[in-house]
Image (spheres, grey):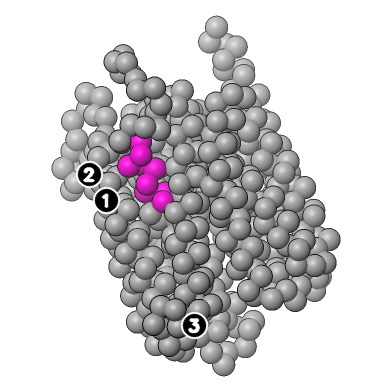
Amino acid sequence: MSTSPRPRSALGRPPVVAWALYDWANSAFATTVMAGFFPVFFKQYWNAGVAATESTYRLGVTSGVASLVVALLAPAMGAIADKGGARVRLMMVFTVLGAASTVALAFVARGNWQAAAALYLVASLGFWGGIVFNDSLLLHVAEPDEYDLVSGYGYSLGYLGGGLLFAVNVLMTVHPEWFGLANAAEAVRWSFVSVGVWWLLFALPCATLVRERREGRVALPISAAVRQGFGELGGTLHEIRRYRPLLWFLAAYILYIDGVNTVIKMAVDYGLSLGFDQSHLVKALLLTQFVAFPAALAFGWLGGKIGARKGIFLALAVYLAATCYAYFLKEVRDFYVLAIVVGLVQGGIQSLSRSYYGSLVPPEKSSEFFGFYNMMGKASAIVGPALVGVTAAMTGDPRLSILSIVLLFLAGGALLVVAARSERRIESASR
């Protein structure tokens, strides 16, 4: 650890700002594409004339396959980065892949759902792959006592940046004539282009200003790093098992972040099932983004005061209450209230989870261990929507389907308690 004097604020250091801007950059894909326009456009444009159940099935399979591919590749990508010292370069490779695929969505013809699904899968791989390497760089731009604040800073900029572009994109679809566009469909196409350009443009500061800490290790050539990275995956899994608090935390994380991801992905679908107008749902999604901007930063500060683990427990309690509240929604204004409440904790639980995990990870294996962290997050994106879908199919009640998410928050919270106890036992034994 460096002993040189620090600037008054970690958030003012150029590498920290550049690192956080990557969240600003790629969050445009998460908001405009993943949560906003792609599900609606996929159903109404690329699956025009297809039964709603069939288009939903196709979208679910596409999202599930994308999550599965990333889940399988994430640990290998992390191991390769650790061996090759290539976190920044590989982050940019996946960024270019994701941005280019997103732009290509604008040129997919009406009814060609197969091409749209394939490009969305590749874009998702670029999105999540870039996150693997950017997450691990947290340990290279911040000191341990800064993890909570800097992680929250990244998420807050992500919500602000993604929200700003999404607001412009929504305006493009509502008033396409203001932008010289023929109709809403053309506006959505140009929105995909804007996301790709935004993503690549604001990723450049991270690529140019962030440098990895070598810590006396010699980086291998990429070819050798690939061989050793894949060859040591089994050893990595065995090594993770030695870190009991970390292992329990991963088990808790895969459950509660599954609930968080499911709320993000299913909120608009749930609102439509209740008969709410699509325009209100998009506005509520936009509201969540702007509430989450200051809230994520506030949670980073709170984590520094009370500890990341307690902050996660607080966010879980709010999610439990919000999910129960969702069961009783009757009017559109209730959906707006729900959007505000979720926005208050959505970025907080994500940022504190990242920083808490970072505090448990050996610095020399940051990418490798963050690969498993992201694998858990992506694997969880498969389970939650399936739970909601099966509950809806068995009961025929969308309210019960959304209430099923409570199980994920309760189970995740219980395992987080076990992780905390394991950490305290190790601390006591080391004194």
The mark found on residue 381 in the picture is none
Q: Position of residue 282 (x, y in %)?
A: 60, 68
- Is residue 110 left or right of 200 when viewed as pictured? right
Which residue sits furthest top?
431
Please give the name of the residue rendered at 50% of the width and 64% of the height, measured from the top-left corner. Answer: 167
Q: Is residue 358 above or below residue 373?
A: above
Residue type marked 1: Leu
Q: Residues within 10 Å of mark 3 (few under 14, many from 20)?
A: some
Name the quadrant of the N terminus.
Answer: top left
Tell me, yes or no, whether the two marked residues, 1 and 2, touch with CB atoms within 8 Å.
yes
Q: Residues within 10 Å of mark 1 (few under 14, many from 20)?
A: some
Residue type marked 3: Ala
Residue occupied by mark 3: 184
Front residue of 380 and 46? 46
Q: Residues within 10 Å of mark 2 (few under 14, many from 20)?
A: few
Estimate the spatial distance between the alpha carbons at disc 3 and disc 1, rounded to whole Å: 31 Å
Q: Earlier in the sequence, mark 3 or mark 1?
A: 3
Residue occupied by mark 1: 204
